[in-house]
Amino acid sequence: MRIAIATALALGVLIAPARSSAQTSLDAFGALPIGHVASSLGDSGMPVDFGGRVSFDAVPAVQLFGEFGRLGNVMPPLVDTGLAFTRLNVTASAFYGEGGVRLLAAPHSAVTPYVEGTAGVAHMSFGASGFSSTTDAIVRAALNLVDTRDPMFGVGGGLLMQSGPLQFDVGYRYKRIVANDALSSAMGAGQQLQSHQIRFGAGVRF
């Protein structure tokens, strides 16, 4: 009995710090899309990537998170470049939700490198202009009637900087949307719908 009690107390001492160190964080981020020559493409004249996430520590070096955001331009770079020399303007953006795992190299340090992987679903939005005013209106109306949801995957890495309850994040993200319908494939000319980002984020831990 004494051995059992001593063992239970020892396990409690070992487990308590791990539980107390587990934290939840809320973050918001903005991202600069890269890899597109025609940077003027986008629903609002300029690609805009932004979003937020909630994460918690599964174990000291592993975080699980959920993320929601917007990708302002996921057109394939080859198509994007080709359209830059025409009057046509074809856009592909997406709102998405995904879950992921982040691995921290030095979870107890003020600055730690990390890598992460994600999977989720993207709600695609397409647009086209440059034909004529009447044709543009018809095309926009037709595309808005299409409800396109495609699976997406991502990887990334960067640096996480922590100071008290505040944390800052700078890194790179690659997002790929897997077109599983005719419209997504046609708008991307059969190529990958993707996004490369330089991301900046800030949040709080509690």
Image (spheres, rainbow, N blue to C red):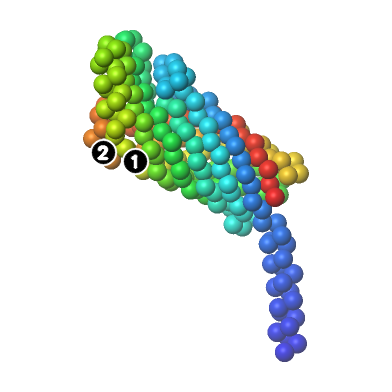
Q: Secondary structure at mark 2?
A: loop
Q: Secondary structure at mark 1?
A: strand
Residue ID at (47%, 40%): 155
* Residue 105 x %, y %: 62, 47
Question: Vertically, is 172 above or below 60?
Answer: above
Question: Vertically, is 23 above or below 17?
Answer: above
State left or right for residue 163 relative to residue 48.
right
Residue ID at (58%, 34%): 29
| Amino acid type, callout 2 | Asp
The Cα atoms of the two marked residues, 2 and 1, are separated by: 8 Å
Label 2 sits on residue? 181
State left or right for residue 149 relative to residue 161.
left
* Residue 204 x %, y %: 68, 43
* Residue 10 x %, y %: 73, 74
Q: Residue furthest bottom?
A: 1
Quadrant location, the N terminus: bottom right
Closer to the camera in the image, 130 or 137: 137
Q: Are marks 2 and 1 in contact (CB under 8 Å)?
A: yes
Closer to the camera in the image, 161 or 49: 49
Asked whether residue 103 is in view, the answer is no
Question: Vertically, is 138 above or below 116?
Answer: above
Labelled disc at residue 150: 1
Asked whether residue 138 is in view, the answer is yes
* Residue 164 x %, y %: 76, 44
